[in-house]
Image (cartoon, grey):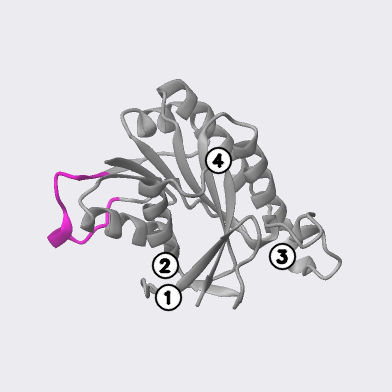
């Protein structure tokens, strides 16, 4: 499978690149600084580094054209001062439509999951004000995906540990998993996103994830 990965130099993105290559996929890693993403010993004809800006329509169109699936692990400022997460996803969606690509698995935050009463966790009075700006960016990204006709899955992560895959994690559709330990390894998020592209278990769902 040919996969375009946005946010390919971040904690989750770089591990998604390596794991996808190890699984035999062809990987197109998109970002502004991707030249040195892969160690020389790991470079293969199945890897392509694509320099570009996620707000640029032509850059993104070229990056998704010919791919069978998209993974987005876009980041941005924690205070919500930039719109990389929300407007980046909006542009990716638009260019996927043009290119005829349907499948995307994107990374967001825990606050987009539902509480027991069906409201978003981000709307709870107990939700930390410090996390609200970035949480609203994640929410907007989710709403763009939800309003599209793509085959999307939105992974709603708690605190991300800069750690490789452990295979000790749990997931749940639309609500936080139980127990929710409030953190998960970046490598485990990458593992789930790649598996989900293959099994399509959570189409049109948010997914809570936590270390087990």
Which residue position is annotated with label 1? 168
Q: Is residue 28 left or right of residue 208?
A: left
Separation of residues labelled 1 and 3 (CA atoms): 26 Å
* Earlier-in-chain disc, 1 versus 2: 1
* Earlier-in-chain disc, 1 versus 3: 3
Placement of 152 over or under 38, stated as above or below: above
* SS of the residue under disc 3: helix
The secondary structure that most of the magenta stretch takes on is loop
Q: Which mark identifies residue 188?
A: 2
* SS of the residue under disc 1: loop
Proximity of marks 2 and 4: CB atoms separated by less than 8 Å = no
Which residue position is annotated with label 3? 131
In the image, residue 39 lies in the stretch drawn in magenta: yes
Position of the N terminus, as image quadrant, is: top left
The answer to which image quadrant residue 188 occupies is bottom left
Is disc 1 surrounded by few (<14), some (14 to 19) or many (20+) residues within 10 Å?
Answer: few
Separation of residues labelled 3 and 2 (CA atoms): 22 Å
- Can residue 8 be seen in this snapshot? no
Which residue position is annotated with label 4? 88
Placement of 46 over or under 178, stated as above or below: above
Mark 3 or mark 2, which is nearer to you? Answer: 2
Separation of residues labelled 1 and 2 (CA atoms): 8 Å
Q: Residue at x 33, y 42 (%)?
A: 3
Which portion, as a residue range, is magenta? 35-48
Q: Residue 40, position in %: x, y?
A: 15, 59
Q: Is residue 88 left or right of residue 175?
A: left
* Earlier-in-chain disc, 1 versus 4: 4
Is disc 3 surrounded by few (<14), some (14 to 19) or many (20+) residues within 10 Å?
Answer: some
């Amino acid at each position: 499978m040919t996969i375009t990965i946005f946010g390919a130099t971040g904690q989750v993105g770089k591990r998604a690149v390596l794991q996808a290559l190890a699984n035999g996929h062809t990987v197109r890693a998109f970002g502004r600084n991707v030249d040195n993403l892969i160690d020389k010993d790991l470079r293969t004809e199945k890897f392509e580094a694509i320099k570009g800006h996620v707000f640029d329509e032509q850059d993104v169109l070229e990056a998704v054209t010919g791919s069978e699936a998209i993974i987005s692990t876009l980041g941005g400022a924690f205070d919500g001062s930039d719109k990389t997460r929300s407007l980046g996803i909006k542009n990716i969606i638009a260019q996927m439509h043009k290119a005829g690509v349907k499948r995307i698995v994107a990374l967001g935050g825990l606050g987009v999951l539902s509480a027991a009463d069906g409201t978003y966790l981000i709307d709870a009075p107990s939700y930390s004000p410090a996390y609200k700006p970035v949480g609203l960016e994640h929410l907007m990204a989710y709403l763009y995906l939800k309003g599209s006709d793509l085959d999307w899955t939105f992974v709603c992560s708690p605190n991300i540990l800069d750690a490789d895959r452990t295979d000790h994690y749990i997931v749940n559709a639309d609500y936080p998993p139980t127990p929710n330990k409030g953190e998960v390894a970046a490598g485990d998020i990458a593992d789930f996103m790649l598996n989900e592209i293959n099994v399509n278990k959570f189409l049109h769902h948010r997914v809570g994830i936590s270390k087990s």
